[in-house]
Amino acid sequence: MSTIAFAIPGDIGLPTGGYAYDRRLLAEWRDMGVTAEHIALPGSFPFPTADDLHETGRALLQRPYGDTLLIDGLAYGAFPEGIAAGLADRVVALVHHPLALETGLASDMAQRLRERETAALRYARAVVATSPATKRLLVSDFGVPEARIAVALPGVDPAPRAAGSANGEPLSLLAVGSVVPRKGYPVLVEALAGLRDRDWRLTLVGATDRAPETTRDLVAAIEAADLGGRIDLLGAIPDAALADAYARADLFVMPSLFEGYGMVLTEALARGLPIVCTTGGAAAETAPDAAALKVAPGDAAALAKALATLIDAPALRRSMADAAWAAAAALPRWREAATVVAETCLPGFGRKGG
């Protein structure tokens, strides 16, 4: 069986959903006996320097011709057409979400990324999308034939049901995700500023060094709203501490402007947490209606109304928590995702028994 050469830009250990997905594929493949190697690409993607592009091309072209090149979309979507054409029919592209849809890009940069990713995807033998919504987007906006796209939903591990906050404590709200423009945290702060008369406390977990200016602006917004004593901005924390934060939460909130899937939503479902989230990207499909109140991305008033509804209605929270816990039993597991991607990369993998 040939090797999957999994090319990933930057530090694979960073606490993001995309890197977590990539790490878990590699771990599952080890357990499954699939031969796979991590190929580290420069961290400058999706805005690579000329030297980094040269290094990337050399690293990929020196792989044995029989290897399948699985390339994370953070890099592949930024490949110039010349590099993508030189790798034609050897590449499976993994698309978490299109690069041009990252919040905060100048319109001309977003258009250049859209054109570059569209061109690169024409040369991929196959594409793996991490949600049906992303698959539809690739077909409609990037011209990828539907037949060339496989969907490998992120998995989730079974987890204990959240116990919630202790009696007499404020209602515990939890948000998880790196502090970058796409996550919409200023909208959440604006929403919560109108709910200061309720008894709540927000814990926000996520790397604060990915977009320093966004982090500075978020801290300033929290201070301007006089919510510094009610919002705990923890940054990236160890897995055990994150599990404890989920265990102590009463309500999960995700204000993202766009998500290719929304792995944190399934992590919340796995703990039986009721959810308030946006409909940005795939998030509307990831969270079941019975377990989540959903609002349009960027609408602080609608987000505040949804939060107030659940803060003020313990019985509704319990009902939605029960729905989340029931939905958790049907969530996909990581072995399923690893199998789909392996089958896409290695034709005949499933027929040979994996």
Image (spheres, rainbow, N blue to C red):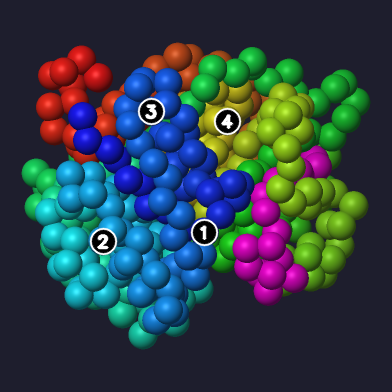
The answer to whether 104 is drawn above or below residue 205 in the figure is below
The image's mark for residue 29 is 3
Amino acid found under the numbered disc labelled 4: Ala
- Residue at 28% x, 58% y is 62
Between marks 1 and 4, how big is the CA–CA gap? 27 Å
If you read the primary sequence from the N terminus, does the residue marked by circle 2 or circle 3 appear first?
3
Q: Which residue is mark 4?
A: 268
If you read the primary sequence from the N terminus, does the residue marked by circle 4 or circle 2 appear first?
2
Residue 195 visible to an observer of this rendering = no
Amino acid found under the numbered disc labelled 2: Leu
Residue 207 painted magenta = yes
If you read the primary sequence from the N terminus, does the residue marked by circle 1 or circle 3 appear first?
1
Between marks 1 and 3, how big is the CA–CA gap? 21 Å
Amino acid found under the numbered disc labelled 3: Trp
Q: Which residue is mark 1?
A: 10
Please give the range of residues in magenta.
Answer: 200-216
Where is residue 72? Give x, y as percent. Answer: 36, 53
Q: Is residue 184 left or right of residue 284?
A: right
Closer to us: mark 1 or mark 4?
1
The image's mark for residue 89 is none
Closer to us: mark 2 or mark 3?
2
Q: Which residue is mark 2?
A: 61
User: Is 151 or 4 nearer to us in this picture?
Assistant: 4
Between marks 4 and 2, how big is the CA–CA gap? 41 Å
Give SS at disc 2: helix
Residue 348 painted magenta = no
